[in-house]
Image (spheres, helix red, strand yellow):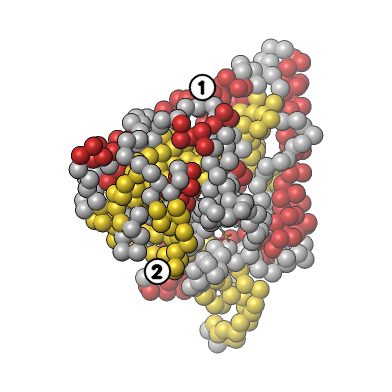
Amino acid sequence: TILILDFGSQYSHLITRRCREHHVYAELMPCTTRLKDIDFKPKGIILSGSPYSVYDKDSPHVDPAVFDLGIPILGICYGLQEIAWNLKGKVSPCEHREYGFAQIQIKKVDGAAASVDALFEGLGDEMQVWMSHGDQLSELPPDFHVIGHTQSAPYAAIAHNSKPLYGIQFHPEVTHSPRGKELIGKFILSICGCRKNWTMEEFIGKEIARIREICGPKGRVIGAVSGGVDSTVAAKLMHEAIGDRFHAIMVDNGVLRLNEAKQVNEMLNKDLGVKLTVVDASDLFLSRLEGVEDPEQKRKIIGNTFINVFEEEALKIEAAADEEEKRGAAAKGRVEWLLQGTLYPDVIESISFKGPSATIKTHHNVGGLLKDMKLKLIEPLRELFKDEVRVLGRLLSIPAPLVGRHPFPGPGLAIRILGPVTRDQVKILQHADSIYIEEIRKAGLYDQIAQAFAVLLPVKAVGVMGDQRTYEQVIALRAVQSEDFMTADWYVFPAEVLRRMSSRITNEVAGINRVTYDISSKPPATVEWL
Ligand code: XMP
């Protein structure tokens, strides 16, 4: 395992990803973590970047004990400065904050020091890298030497003369440093000597064993599924581990995509063998949403109603389990656990060393519910990133179209109907959205797009159909490319694909006479309109 200590850089989680792409397990922890609190023995440590300056009064610092461990340490950006700060080098503010591409000249050192310069081995004499810093090293710490410099940074990369301690000013974890991933590979594989044993096959075996152990021979688990990748994969994994002692509940909130509840039911129940109850609560949701336009209010109502419905169903399942237990024969124990599809980014978000960040939108999550039922949480995906979940899904034989599905927000179409949500508006949007997605699939573009959906605008426009004047609503189409949805670019469709989509939607969807295409990126827009 590689321990990554997070000083709050926006790139910290990318370091974790790059390690795992080399099949080395890496765990991100806050920089304030004390060594005595870690229950594993890392083979190497990476110190991340940070928005702080090492000299700030309240800037974060690493447990100095890490330097006595004798294991390799790589400091990235602030991490480099943190090494210098601890080992008596000097860090000063740059005259101009450096942000962007730089060319690093790699310096070969002969003699004794050469053996510890393994970081750049095989990477050539020069490398393009990405810089983003306001401070830089201005004096080497004792017993360190330079292994790379750029035009503006004489100490862009440094190494200790005899110990495996390295510091680099640039960010190898971002894709703008094209050979950065190789460099991280050098550090974790050659220098730290990690084995490439982080594979999904191993993960499945270990996780199933872990679930069986926690649940014991009788324990039951319930969980909500949405038809999305995460909850489906988590449900299938639970099913593999404990069979029909796992019970999935899908709540139809009336703002799902066309035929979604039916399709999810068929797939989970029939194809994957997971025991599933679909609860049609659309009336309740839609009545609570009546007349509501404010997006945060919509989210809140849907989140709360979901909890009410889910809790009620969970109680029924628990009561049925009690009955069964009383009858004795097929006793399977109580419902003790609640499955959550928490992913690693959520975990990182909650442990990350960051100041409070502004809430742009409250993304509803199932977390924190069922307090009275005293269920314990089971989170089999908590170590995984989204693309790892997809790999896992494929290995668990979940059909490919589902594994590659675009994400769909919990509050569903309610945040894509910009005005008040009614059954009629839901129907119009479901229909337009299904045509849109069908055309994307037909054009073979679905997998190139991170997320695509239709939005129903609360405005009416004039049109003409036959000889008749029409006065109907407008649909906006949205498609984005994105790695992590923190930033996104609008997708450039071929004109004929857009033409077909528009013509089909205006012809086939009653109530729509105009289609627009959203050409905003995030930022300054967001992916969803609400
Ligand atoms: P934004 O609109 O914030 O979206 O740029 C980024 C990603 O988050 C999804 N999203 C949500 N997911 N509940 C969810 O479960 C929500 O309330 C919510 N709002 C946005 C959005 O679909 C995109 O993938």
Q: Quadrant of residue 510?
A: bottom right
Q: Is residue 476 above or below residue 345?
A: below
Q: Which mark is residue 209?
A: 1
Q: Is 198 placed left or right of 223 in the picture?
A: left
Whether the residue under disc 2 has CB within 8 Å of ligand 1 = no
Question: Neighbour class for label 1 at 10 Å: few (<14), some, many (≥20)?
Answer: few
Q: Which residue is mark 2?
A: 493
Residue at the location (54% across, 37% down)? 63
Check disc 2 and report its element: helix, strand or loop. Answer: loop
The amino acid type found where label 1 is placed reads Ala
Which quarter of the image is occupied by the C terminus?
bottom right
Residue nearest the observer in this picture, 114 or 526: 114
Relative to residue 259, is residue 38 depicted above or below?
A: above
- Residue 82, horizontal then vertical, whole percent: 48, 47
Disc number lying in front (2 or 1): 1
Q: Within the image, what quadrant is residue 2 found in?
A: top left
Q: Which kind of residue does numbered mark 2 sit on?
A: Phe
Q: How many marks?
A: 2
